[in-house]
Image: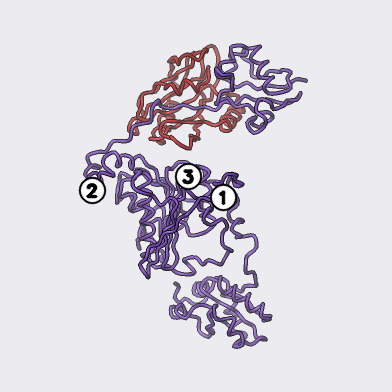
Chain colours: A red, B purple
Amino acid sequence: MTLVLEPRHRDAMRRHGEADYPREACGLIGGTAEDGRKIAVSLVPLRNARTDALRNRYLIDPDAFRRAQDTLERDGLEVIGVYHSHPDHPPVPSAFDRDHAWPWLSYVIVEVRGGRAGEHKSWVLADDRGAFGEETIWQSRS
Amino acid sequence: MAVTILIPTPLRPFVDGRGVLQLEATSVGELLERLTVEHDALRPHLFADDGRLRSFVNVYVNDRDIRQLSQKETPVRPGDTVSIVPSIAGGTAVATELPKLSHEEILRYSRHLILPQVGPAGQRKLKAARVLLVGAGGLGSPAALYLAAAGVGTLGLVDFDVVDKTNLQRQILHGTSKIGTSKLESAKERIHDINPNVRTETFETRLTSENALAILREFDVVADGTDNFPTRYLVNDACVLLGKPNVYGSIFRFEGQASVFYAKEGPCYRCLYAEPPPPGLVPSCAEGGVLGVLPGIIGSIQALEALKLILGAGESLIGRLLLFDALRLQFRELRLEKDPACPVCGGNPTVTELIDYEAFCGIGAAPAYAGPEISASQLAAEWKRNSALVVVDVREPHEREIAHIEGTTLIPLSELPGRLGELDGHAEIVTHCHHGVRSMKALEILRAAGFGKVRSLQGGIDAWSVTVDPDVPRY
């Protein structure tokens, strides 16, 4: 699969990561899936629901997921991915990320170092849950 | 008719791309078993190796989480809808390292850095810390100033007031030039002037049962500088529910109290005061007065305790109530025990979510002293028509020295029951005080004694000064 992102999505994820630094920012990516591509249409920034360890953990609780999913569905969209920030860490999934991951969804990680967004990468869990594989991000022009 | 199962997008590739399935089953456990027998590749995503549902897999039967029902034993009937809903978690591998100190910060905090109990490691803990001050008033002022100067990385402030001239006698965060502006704007400017490294997060709102958890959740330590009982119970309960330490302070006239309520390690505010006092019994600082230095001392103790909690240094005030008497210059200390029957932090809590604290404290429901009131302008008009009207000032003599309304009779509230004989039982009487609280109590006393035509001046002498006679000074 390839994830198709518009520049405005990339910028919004970076800004969210910077705004919430040094806490982890998180949100959902809504879009459509077709012909082996997931095409991002809108982002749903969410509040990190962790009550502790906000700097190195994030949590999107099921109620927030459901609300976001319902909103997206009204626009004919579905949840195609998740984004979160890694404050002062490279944009590579941790073992914790893998243990808690859902298959198929794109996991976009934005590195935020010292309050400035750096690199971002997208990852997808293998169907056997064994590993996260890096996913190609295709930057659309529109 | 079968049970409908809603499959979230990430799992659809494992059920032939479908979002809705129909299966026959009598319980959630049976339903999931059938689902994974038919679609084997789904199993590792729903169940851990020990066969238990993974922690991030949530199952709802008709919008109710099975964790609140009977888990996998939850029965399902034909026509029910079962939804599988993801929660999504993750994060960096190890606890993020504490933020580093810049050269400017090393110089700025040099007197901290040479203390072994703080040192560079402690200073970096302070930089990473997030402290919330509820109230940017008398107690919040010194607390905010010292916490900012000490290098606490993020200070949250909750307040919805504007700076008023009567604040300046004690609220040293605000200056004369800020009268009429928002306390939060004034506080932010002062804090950033003291230490531009501090991030401020301001919440210009009244703290309520609706917003308290969301606001407090984001902070490591909460300092309660509020002046009313509903908010004090609200802050306490929210801290207990979120597992946060609540650094408490309160002041009245010449006396103050401080403690740290941290239910994980000791008692909470409700262990000390299970019930609020009846409304009106304990006067506020606006009614009773307060020596300006007093919040400086108690608020500074709150700042100190917040810093100690962050640093893990010394012995905190957890389980101890500090009592301060400014006139005697005396500190006393009471040991506090955790109440095993405490309704919020005890073994079987009955308060498991935030409640209506105004109602809990008896405010709004039925005022303790109800009676007919008269507005200042109405009183002025009636008094002009009827010079036989008796207006009784129930304040203390020292208050009358500050300001009084010409033609009123002074009978302090405390002396009223013994001086009823001085009043004519047939006359129309209006009682008045500073803001209209004590005059209601006076009205109650007079009515109980058989006086029929009594009213209380709404808003007290303050309202009189604002709407009738500006020559009477406000205080």
**Which comes before the other along the chain, label 1 or label 2?**
2
The answer to whether residue B196 is left or right of residue B267 is left
- Image marks 2 and 3: residues in contact by CB distance under 8 Å: no
Residue B457 on image: x %, y %: 58, 74
Alpha carbon of mark 3 to alpha carbon of mark 1: how far? 22 Å
Q: Quadrant of residue B403?
A: bottom left
Q: What's the amino acid at mark 1?
A: Cys
**Which comes before the other along the chain, label 2 or label 3?**
2
User: Do the residues marked 3 and 1 share a common chain?
Assistant: yes
**Marker disc for residue B398:** none
What residue is shown with label 2? B111
Q: Disc 2 or disc 3, which is closer to the eye?
A: 2
Residue B127 or B160: which is nearer the viewer?
B127
Q: Note whether residue B421 is visible.
A: yes
In terms of secondary structure, where does tag 1 sit?
loop
Q: What's the amino acid at mark 3?
A: Leu
Residue B155 on image: x %, y %: 38, 46
Q: Residues within 10 Å of mark 1 (few under 14, many from 20)?
A: many
The answer to whether residue B445 is left or right of residue B167 is right
What residue is shown with label 3? B216
- Image marks 3 and 1: residues in contact by CB distance under 8 Å: no
